[in-house]
Image (cartoon, rainbow, N blue to C red):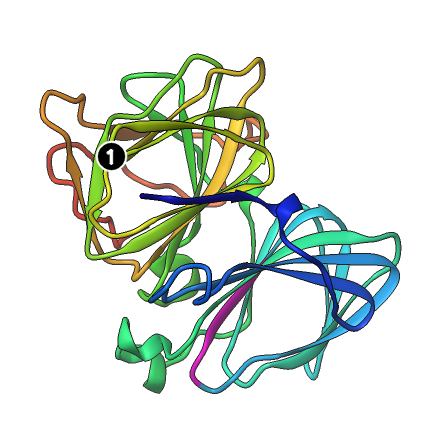
Amino acid sequence: MAVHFNESTVSREPFGAGAERQRLLTTERVAGTNILLDRWTLGPAAVTEIEVSATSLVWCQVLEGEARLAHAGGEERLGDSHLVFLPPRFRGTLASGAGAVLLHAEVPNAARFDPAFATSPPALRIVDWKNEPVLDSQHDARKRIYVVTPKLFGVKAIKGEMIIYPPGTKASNHHHEGAEHFMYLTRGSGTAHANEEPFPVRKGDLVYYAEGERHYFVSDGAEDMVFVEFFVPGEFRTVWATNEPVCTWLPSGRNIRGEKPAREIQAHGGADSTSAQDV
């Protein structure tokens, strides 16, 4: 059965000056997981250090507020549309003037899932997902925005996307072969299913699905349900349940602001549901 809980049930621990950390996804909570996920809360004038090991893949996503990432090469200003990849051996500090909330994820020993990671590790990279192209579902009003891909970050050990469900929309029942993954709800509420068993979900919930577990979401609230989901490794296959509509994602030609996106992505999905590596 899926692992499901709300961030409010996870204790906070001090993490630097004026900062707190909640350990959401751990090997204690999910035995054998290959991805670790924290939620960081930076209070006003908070400062915390970041250090990445030589073998880990790490990224941070700002959910609320603004933060400054200082490192040997300079300083990066991050807002609630930014996701940053931190290279192996990265050292720096993360600070916030008025406060910020972030997700921090780590894949230890990332070369297990991408042999090129050891010899050609990704560099420091920041993506503004609000400039990325929106893909529209062929069968309904859902939208998809890729936030971690081989093209964006040069690594195949992880893949991530943001999915937007307007009220009354749902996905087809399916499962994945070759990857575990989790969803973190950033907005709205709905109903999730794991092997056909329903349970309610809301903002701040984390839902973890093991490889092979059938699942889908339904947006049955009054506002859009939005979540980010990440897969480890980033290469996998999606298998649709019998008689379920096969999802295909079509380019919209716009970003979430309704403007021309930073790049273009072609249609993909359908019957050939091996994860796309050219996005």
Q: Which residue is mark 1?
A: 195
Report the front residue among 1 and 182.
1
Q: Quadrant of the N terminus?
A: top left
Kindly indicate the quadrant of the structure image that contains residue 213: top left
Vertical side of 112 occupied by 182: above or below: above
Chief SS of the magenta region: strand
Report the front residue among 19 and 14.
14
The 10 Å Cα crowd at callout 1, few under 14, some 14 to 19, many 20 or more, is: some
Kindly indicate the quadrant of the structure image that contains residue 172: top left
Vertical side of 155 occupied by 261: above or below: above
Residue under the image location 21 percent in, 54 percent down = 236
Instruction: Look at the image and give the residue range highlighted in magenta.
Output: 55-60
Q: Position of residue 70 (x, y in %)?
A: 74, 74
Q: Is residue 169 left or right of residue 172?
A: right
Q: Position of residue 123 (x, y in %)?
A: 49, 75
Q: Is residue 175 magenta?
A: no
Q: Position of residue 65 (x, y in %)?
A: 77, 47
Residue under the image location 60 percent in, 40 percent down = 204
Does residue 104 appear in the picture of this structure? yes
Q: Is residue 204 left or right of residue 139?
A: right
What kind of residue is marked 1? Asn
Residue under the image location 27 percent in, 71 percent down = 113
Vertical side of 257 occupied by 141: above or below: above
Does residue 260 appear in the picture of this structure? no
